[in-house]
Image (cartoon, helix red, strand yellow):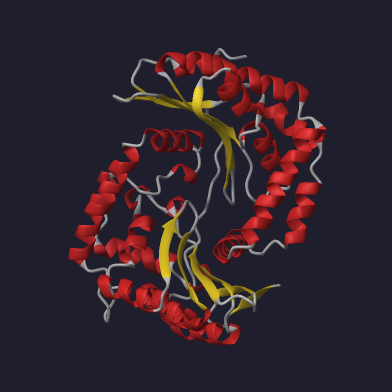
Amino acid sequence: MVKVRKLSCGATMVMDRTDYLRSASLGIWVNSGSCFEKPEESGISHYIEHMLFKGTSSKSAREIAESVDRIGGSFNAFTGKESTCFYIKTLSSNIRAGAEILLEMLTDSLFDQEDMDKERFVILEEIKMSRDTPDDQVVELITELVNSENPYKNSILGTPESLKGIDRDLMLSYFRRRYARDNIVISVTGNFDEDELAELFDEKLMCLEAEGEVVSQEIGPYVQKFAVEKRDIEQTHICLAAPGISIEDDGYYAWTLMNNIFGGGMSSRLFQKIREEKGLAYSVCSVNGFYSKTGFFNIYAGVAHDKAEETIDAINSELKLYAAEGPTEDELAMAKAQAESSYIFGLENSNSRMVNIGKNQLLLGRVLSPDEVIDGFDSVTVDSIREILSGLGDMSNYCGASVTARDLDLEGLIKNEN
């Protein structure tokens, strides 16, 4: 059973204890991500994530890593559009020590200028690596296009230009504004002492600001946009996207199942038509992007350069057919089984549970129970998916992005698909 505990320091702790386990997973979630950044701060949330591993007043970067190895733990961090998470997994007997390591990183990092300069170079290499991976780059492009009128367009990594402008004063100012106690959720799963950890976080987090800044997240109207980036590569990578819904929307479960049926797996309509029947692509899929204020629906395919037009036409035909007919009862039943199984399997892994309850609490302000999630999927009907498809069936309204070696009139192709 998940317990939510408001600490006296202002942070929130969510705990899911399992006594028979001999390990525990702990995550510190911060309401800090690219959607909160001003243009001159682009990439700063991710930059700070890196810097918290670079050393404290008592430990070097190497000593931080060695302290985790000494307790047999594994740790890491990630930054998204709306959150940054620092996490560790270790034996139950060592989870307090693991928590102390993360807390020292969070509250006593030096942000040394020399380390900042080195890490800026590391992130610049990370940006190059992403740009050298065309399937990653086309997703970055489509995310920016479909969210062009809202803050979710912001790049998580930032740009070489923005990173050069981030100095220590700007980083510390942003850290104080976002890394405040009321912006922090601690999620813990496995076997651990609830009171011991709560007392530890209550004591150690008091040095942070009490309240974080309030940022207005304005969601502007959808604007159809296109981008084609030419590269010397062997495949044409295509993304087609339309506006979706937020993670808080009542239609979340219906949208999830709609996507599973269309392009979420090997039995999906898109995979079977584009890859198995037509042999046009090795990789083809559709995904939902859910944020706390908005979302989008994205279709991806990587194809031979001379097959781009045929692939777009085939995707459009399948989308139209899906919108006209809706899913079958059998497709819906399979999608429900897949979604519910995936969710339950995740609950059987302490790391996955830690992420699930931490993200829920940070973005939704509550933790969804397993019964609530299963009931949500079970409540979806063929008609509720048909209602979604009435707005997604016309590809001529989609945004489009491509990374390719050829001249491609993507805008013309998409706008003429009606």
Q: Nearer the viewer, residue 104 or 397?
A: 104
Front position in the image: 199 or 340:
340
Q: Give percent across and percent down for residue 271.
A: 60, 28
- Residue 79 against residue 189 in the figure, above or below: above
Residue 156 in picture, x, y percent from top left? 40, 49
Q: Quadrant of the N terminus?
A: bottom right
Q: Quadrant of residue 12?
A: bottom right
Q: Is residue 340 above or below residue 303?
A: below
| Residue lying at 56% horizontally and 15% vertically, measured from the top left | 313
The number of callouts visible is 0
Res. 222 in view: no
**Image position of 181 (left or right of 267):** left
Q: Is residue 215 left or right of residue 273?
A: left
Kindly identify the residue that appears in the image at 29 percent across and 24 percent down: 232
- Is residue 152 placed above or below 82 in the rendered structure? above
- The image quadrant where one finds the C terminus is top right
Is residue 87 visible in the rendered structure shown here?
yes
Q: Residue at 33% of width from left, 57% of height from top?
A: 47
Coordinates of residue 305 in the picture (x, y in percent): 40, 17
Query: Image quarter for residue 233?
Result: top left
Query: With 388 as the anchor, is 12 left or right in this view?
Result: left
Quarter of the image where one finds residue 227 = top left
Q: Position of residue 96 (x, y in %)?
A: 48, 82
Q: Residue at x 36, y 78 (%)?
A: 70
